Image (cartoon, rainbow, N blue to C red):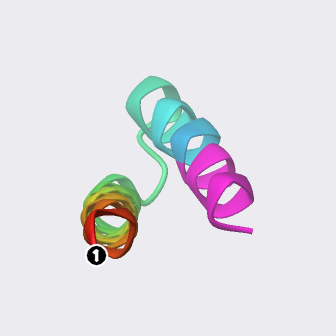
Amino acid sequence: MLWTIIGILLVLWILGLIAHIAGAFIHLLLIIAVIIFIIKLVSRKRDHDR
């Protein structure tokens, strides 16, 4: 599910760069998706260390 959201946001971000469609909003969503992805990776790694 998370990979799907990241993929969609990445495509929208590239479209925003090319066509200047809602650029700031898409950049913000992409940054939020990357932060969530990093948090998920860190929390998964901590669960395996226990």
Residue 3 part of the magenta segment: yes
Quarter occupied by the N terminus? bottom right
For the image, the number of numbered tags is 1
Q: Which of 12 and 18 is in front in this view?
A: 12
* Three-letter code for the amino acid on which mark 1 is drawn: Arg
Q: Name which quarter of the figure residue 43 lies in.
A: bottom left
| Most common SS among magenta residues | helix
Is disc 1 surrounded by few (<14), some (14 to 19) or many (20+) residues within 10 Å?
few
User: Which residue appears farthest toward the front when viewing the image?
Assistant: 50
Residue occupying image coordinates x 53% and y 41%: 10
Residue occupying image coordinates x 28% and y 75%: 50
3 versus 48 height, above or below: above
- Range of residues picked out in magenta: 1-9
Q: Nearer the viewer, residue 29 or 40?
A: 40
In the image: residue 29, left or right of residue 9: left
Q: Nearer the viewer, residue 15 or 31?
A: 31
In the image: residue 7, left or right of residue 37: right
Residue 11 percent coordinates (x, y): 62, 38
In the image: residue 12, left or right of residue 45: right
Q: Which of 24 and 28 is in front in this view?
A: 28
38 versus 50 height, above or below: above
Mark 1, secondary structure of its residue: loop
31 versus 16 height, above or below: below
31 versus 18 height, above or below: below
Residue 32 part of the magenta segment: no
Residue occupying image coordinates x 34% and y 52%: 23
Q: Mark 1 points at which residue?
A: 50
